[in-house]
Image (spheres, rainbow, N blue to C red):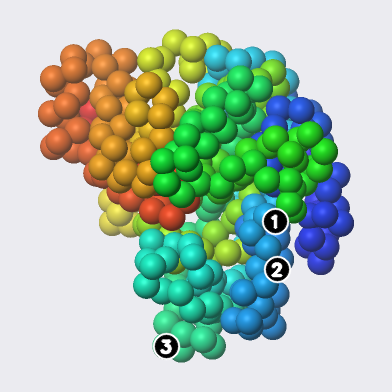
Amino acid sequence: MHEIRIDRSKRLPEQSEHGHNRYHPDIVPILEVAEDEEVVVETRDGLDGQLQPDATAEDVLRFDGGAVHPLTGPLYIKGAEPGDGLEIEYLDIESQPTAVSCIIPGLGLLRGEMNEPYVVHWRIADGWATSEQIPGVRIPGAPFMGISAVSPSMAKLKEWADREQRLIDKGGLAFPPDPDGAIPSGACGLNGLRTIPPRENGGNFDVKQLTKGAKLILPVFTEGALFSIGDGHFAQGDGEVCVTAIEMGATATVRFKLLKGLAASRSFQAPVFTHEDYFADPEVAVPRRFLGVMGMPITRDGENEDENLMLACKNAVLNMMELLQERGFDRKQAYVICSVAADLRIGNVVDVPNYVVTALLPEVIFG
């Protein structure tokens, strides 16, 4: 078993040899891992420790957005090649004892209405989160990693940066490459993609079903895949509407499997995930395994449509139909199956410009 340990009393710039906060294929991997090897990965909270347990609303106003999402990695997966699928199995996700949520002016679903800074500090114990700022409420834990990503290739990095700039030029909201606060610095920081929106390589999709026991499949774009992880959440509502969940440092134990040629053989490239018992009923002996796909507001010709939740819904359904067709159903059958059995869920409506909608299909319907 491999272990990647960090010092959470230090922010990422003080321990940059263990991580990064931009995507770029030239970032040097910190570890080589083979298939089926387990890796224990310690991560910082998604705000890089900027809001410590004594932080106030005034500290939120001093928040450095360029430093968000310190990721641990990248990990070089031996044998991974462009066109493969990389399966990540979440064997365990452990929480740190403190966490934070906040309202950041200018961000979130209601950014035009909720524009005063606010901070909530959580204590995590016995599977629950409680806070003096919100007395009388306790949140049950369902820890998951907000970000799991592989690296884009140089071609994809340019393609995605260009499409997001076109969106900005049309008046949409996106965050272009920016070296301010970037780790690493230099060319990777100057040209690296921000981690705020999810993309075809995974990233900040904030899908709450990716708890312990889940398996996520990402398309591989570079040799070695260059996998990174971070942004642990103790709990989150679908949507993450105020732009933060219960943000925590986490320790994730993961295992990898290569699905050779999977991404190249499919007509779309989008994250796919499964879980054995997320919907399990404690009174039913057999867990309810589900198959899930994601949809983002990206057109079929590769253009961003600003915060278009309807397009994300359509893409989630189309991606599920694609998987069903691979199982032998025709397009009409697949469409009806989605209508009668698939649940559309909002993953997030804040990680601009790529909101995420998931389609979840219970495997029990296949007998």
Q: How many marks?
A: 3
Q: In the rendered image, which residue does mark 2 sit on?
A: 50
Question: Label 3 neighbourhood size at 10 Å, few (<14), some (14-19), many (20+)?
Answer: few
Please say if the residues under marks 2 and 1 sit with CB atoms less than 8 Å apart.
Answer: yes
Query: Left or right: where does residue 235 sit relative to residue 359?
Result: right
- Mark toward the start of the polypeptide (2 vs 1): 2
Nearer the observer, 201 or 190: 190
Displayed quadrant of residue 88: top right
Task: Say the numbered circle drawn on residue 67.
Answer: 1
* Residue 272 place in picture, x, y as percent: 43, 32
The residues tagged by marks 3 and 1 sit, at their Cα atoms, a distance apart of 33 Å
The residues tagged by marks 2 and 3 sit, at their Cα atoms, a distance apart of 27 Å
Above or below for 116 versus 68: below
Which dot, 3 or 1, sits closer to the camera? 1
The residues tagged by marks 2 and 1 sit, at their Cα atoms, a distance apart of 9 Å
Which dot, 2 or 3, sits closer to the camera? 2
